[in-house]
């Protein structure tokens, strides 16, 4: 993914109200997320197709939905993101890409798909599993107590370490700026 470097005329960071306004709309959030995942500039048609697919769950999405998404992106959402210098939107060429300012918005976007859980929930689950396992060893429950508390302690430490390593690796692909 590439991010267009801009020599910004705007001074300072985005206001909290501007960030909230950007993120409160699903189409703007989907646009930023899809641009972040893209490997370079993206056409408005491709973005509209993607967002229409997400909204309808159909691939390809119905033509009227795709057209509705395209019009709202072209007339409302992309000009707003361009004005805030989050994306570079070339209306004549119908091409857009993220700008450096997108980083200010990205920190508020934890992207968790509908079928997924957040990392915070995952680590909470692993912690609960650890407590339950260690209590089971303490109270000599059949299968668990055979291995002893030392084994389970090392197992849980390794599980946390491997999870944190994978978490760190997987988050790198979502970083806008390295």
Image: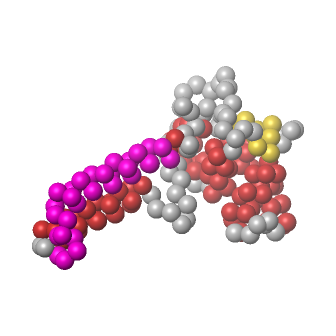
In the picture, the quarter occupied by the N terminus is top right
Outermost bottom residue: 142
Image side of residue 126 versus residue 61, left or right? left
> In front here: 34 or 90?
34
Residue at 72%, 38% in the rendered image: 40
Residue 108 at x, y = what percent? 50, 46
Quarter location, residue 118: bottom left
Question: What is the x, y in percent for residue 68?
Answer: 80, 61
| Residue 163 belongs to the span the image colors magenta | yes
The furthest residue to the right: 92
Q: Is residue 27 visible?
A: yes
Magenta part, dominant SS: helix
Q: Work out whether 171 lies above or below 66.
A: above
Residue 4 or residue 149, whichever sits in front: 149
The residue furthest front is 146
Q: Quadrant of the C terminus?
A: top right
Residue 166 in the image: x percent, y percent? 44, 48
| Residue 172 is covered by the magenta coloring | no
Q: Residue at x 22, y 60 (%)?
A: 152
Residue at 34 percent of width and 63 percent of height: 125
- Answer with left or right where residue 18 lies relative to residue 168: right
Compared with 131, 6 (above or below) is above
Q: Nearer the viewer, residue 1 or 156?
A: 156
The segment highlighted magenta reads 141-170
Can I make out residue 82 in this image?
no
Check the image and tell me how it is coloured.
Answer: secondary structure
Name the residue located 37 percent from the left edge and 50 percent from the top edge. 162
Viewer-proximal residue among 159 and 72 = 159
Marks counted in the figure total 0
* Residue 34 percent location from the top left of the image: 66, 49
């Amino acid at each position: 993914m590439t991010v267009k470097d801009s020599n910004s005329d705007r001074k300072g960071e985005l206001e909290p109200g501007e960030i909230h306004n950007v993120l409160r709309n699903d189409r703007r959030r989907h646009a930023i997320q899809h641009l972040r995942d893209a490997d370079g500039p993206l056409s408005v048609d491709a973005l509209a197709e993607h967002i229409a697919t997400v909204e309808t769950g159909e691939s390809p999405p119905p033509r009227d939905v795709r057209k509705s998404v395209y019009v709202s992106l072209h007339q409302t959402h992309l000009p707003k993101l361009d004005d805030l210098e989050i994306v570079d939107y070339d209306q004549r060429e119908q091409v857009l890409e993220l700008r450096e300012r997108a980083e200010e918005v990205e920190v508020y976007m934890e992207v968790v798909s509908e079928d997924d859980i957040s990392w915070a929930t995952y680590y909470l689950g692993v912690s609960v599993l650890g407590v339950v396992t260690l209590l089971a060893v303490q109270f000599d429950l059949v299968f668990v107590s055979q291995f002893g508390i030392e084994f389970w302690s090392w197992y849980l430490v390794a599980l946390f370490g491997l999870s944190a390593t994978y978490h760190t690796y997987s988050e790198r692909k979502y970083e806008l700026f390295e």
